[in-house]
Image (cartoon, helix red, strand yellow):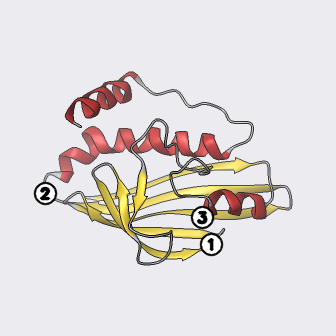
């Protein structure tokens, strides 16, 4: 089953500033893109670079390609049944505006044919909106649906 999912935000900043937000991706206190306070931390086995292995929670991936401040692509290695990639891209519109886009493109197989539409998709969408909120200045805060709040509560009990 193919999945194509895109989230983007028009930021009121030039591509250099938006690129610095992308380059800060590390899930630490200086991270201006990953909502590390409300979601499982993004962790890697080494600094962000091609070949780094890591992920967040049960979602695992390898950095397939990285152009600092411009683009990063992650190839899924887990959960089982996720085959494809997700990426962030900084897309200049003009000197004062930039689109920050996250694209997920994959096929799902096996149990992921159920887990993606029932759980992962909802959590992914909420996490990405939180990520883009963090990048946007001033931030507009996304609101989680009741279903996302339920899934998060269930996930916290499992961990």
| Numbered disc 2: secondary structure | loop
Q: What's the CA distance linking mark 2 and mark 1?
A: 35 Å
Residue depicted at x 50% and y 45%: 128
CA distance separating discs 3 and 2: 30 Å
Mark 3 neighbour density, 10 Å: few (under 14) some (14–19) many (20 or more): many
44 in relation to 138, above or below: below
Point out the tag, 2 or 1, that comes first from the N-terminus: 1
Residue 68 marker: 1
Image quadrant containing the C terminus: top left
Q: Is residue 18 left or right of residue 132?
A: right
Q: Considering only vertical position in the picture, is 151 above or below 77?
A: above
Query: Quarter of the image holding residue 60?
Result: bottom left
Report which residue position mark 2 lands on: 110
Question: Which mark's residue is nearer the viewer, 3 or 1?
Answer: 1
Q: Earlier in the sequence, mark 3 or mark 1?
A: 1
Image-based side of 125 in relation to 9, left or right: left
Choose top left, top right, bottom left or bottom right for residue 122.
Answer: top left
From the viewer's perspective, is residue 23 above or below residue 146?
below
Q: Which residue is depicted at the point 47% across and 78% down? A: 50
Percent across and percent down for residue 143 are 52, 27
Residue that sits furthest to the right in the current view: 95
Taking the spot 68% from the left edge, 36% from the top edge, the residue there is: 139
Residue that badge 3 annotates: 89
Camera-nearest label, 2 or 1: 1
* Pointers 2 and 1 in contact (C-beta within 8 Å): no
């Amino acid at each position: 089953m193919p999945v194509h999912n895109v989230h983007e935000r028009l930021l009121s900043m030039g591509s250099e500033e938006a690129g610095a937000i992308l380059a800060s991706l590390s899930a630490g206190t200086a991270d201006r893109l990953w909502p590390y306070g409300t979601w499982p931390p993004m962790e890697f086995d080494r600094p962000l670079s091609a070949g780094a292995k890591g992920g967040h929670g049960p979602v695992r991936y390898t950095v397939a390609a990285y152009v600092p401040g411009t683009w990063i692509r992650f190839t899924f290695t887990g959960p089982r049944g996720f085959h494809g990639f997700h990426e962030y891209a900084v897309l200049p519109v003009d000197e004062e505006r930039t689109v920050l886009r996250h694209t997920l493109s994959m096929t799902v197989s096996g149990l992921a044919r159920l887990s993606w539409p029932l759980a992962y998709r909802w959590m992914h969408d909420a996490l990405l909106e939180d990520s883009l909120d963090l990048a946007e200045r001033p931030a507009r805060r996304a609101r989680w649906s009741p279903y996302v709040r339920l899934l998060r509560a269930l996930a916290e009990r499992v961990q």
